[in-house]
Amino acid sequence: MLTLEGLHKTYPPTDPSQGAGKTAPALRGVSITVEKGEFYTLLGPSGCGKTTMLQCIAGLETPDSGDITMCGEVVFSSARNIFVPASKRRLGMVFQSYAIWPHMTVFENVAFPLRQGGKGLSKQVLGDRVMAALDRVKLRDFANRPAPYLSGGQQQRVALARALVGEPRVILLDEPLSNLDAKLRDEMRVELRDLVKSLGITTIYVTHDQVEALSMSDRIALMKDGKVIQEGTPADLYMRPKTAFASEFVGRSNLIPGKVVNGSADSDYGTVAVQFGDIRCRLPDGVAVGESVNVMVRPHGIDVNGQADEINRFAGRVRGTSFVGEFLDICVDLKGCSLRVYASPYDAITTGQEVALSFPPDRCVVLLPDEAAISGEGGRYSQSLEQPSHRSD
């Protein structure tokens, strides 16, 4: 449906003192394929290149090199000097600001792209298509309402109806929920995904919010510094991250430095020696005995005071607790190593209490140092042995 091959894009330096020869790379050889009807998310921190990629797909930016193919049609190719303008790509786009015209009614806002598209539609056909788009977003009764008299959620749906009215092949969504309050954002996540999936429209969604990405996507491309660091289903990225950056950005995690002490040719599992003992876990292909690695385990993946005969069971002491409601957020010290653990809110766990932590081997993910170094941030995304990271994403 949509293919990007070897996409490069650079911008001139914002600081003239950097010199005319220095540029700011936004995309570095990005290649992805999005299937028809797929909800595909570009996830990453600010400045990682996700919005630039979306604008290149839309035809609002021109890549320096590479190819973009949509429904079998090449819409951009640097080698063949092809550039199909945005108005000819049959795309719908919803911006972060929604870009609703305040001097127009809801109907006029949605009708705008049809009137400006030069399609010469009759008044009857135009009206039918606008009302059909408003029906899809449940705003038919608001057709004559002035745009300034809409709530944030209603404005978001007007922007979505305007993107759908042209019957696009692909719809592009650039952080469309970021301006909504938390409760409405939760509601619109479900509503937006259900709508585009019911219409079968291929959707490219840009966000820096991991909850949006995990809950809405069929597949996710995690980006950093203009590159796709990892691509996969939400479960792939959360349960099987390949880098320290991925493990920290997509959810919270504990990264525990250690060294591989044994493995087996006929098994995927081996043993990693860490500060508080030996952990049995699944080893990635190519890891060797004696190699330094990080063992990643999610706070939800650690069992507290479970079966006495469980493997990877270690004694620790609670340093602090925080009642979050859905879970009890506790910090546990294991021989000087601080780990964050999410326990049941019904467990009676208090500061200073001794607890037994169990690490199921299939929940322990081994990350190689060279993979973790892809993040390019040194120790920024590494779990400190003195104090666990506690992201607020």
Image (tube, helix red, strand yellow):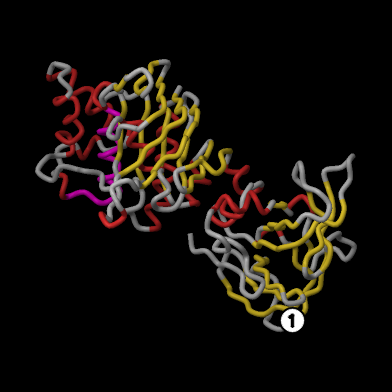
The range drawn in magenta is: 149-165
| Residue lying at 45% horizontally and 39% vertically, measured from the top left | 28
| Nearer to me, 70 or 110 | 70
* Helix, strand or loop at mark 1: loop
Q: Residue at x 41, y 32 (%)?
A: 196
Q: Label 1, on which residue? A: 353
Residue 303 in percent (x, y) is at 75, 62
Q: Is residue 166 visible?
A: yes
Label the magenta part by its dominant secondary structure. Answer: helix
Query: In screen coordinates, is 115 left or right of 11?
Result: left
Nearer to us in this view, 210 or 77: 77
> Which amino acid type corresponds to the residue marked 1 in the rendered image?
Gln
- 363 lies left or right of 100: right
* Residue 207 counted in the magenta span: no
The quarter of the rendered structure image containing the N terminus is top left
> Which quarter of the figure has residue 100?
top left
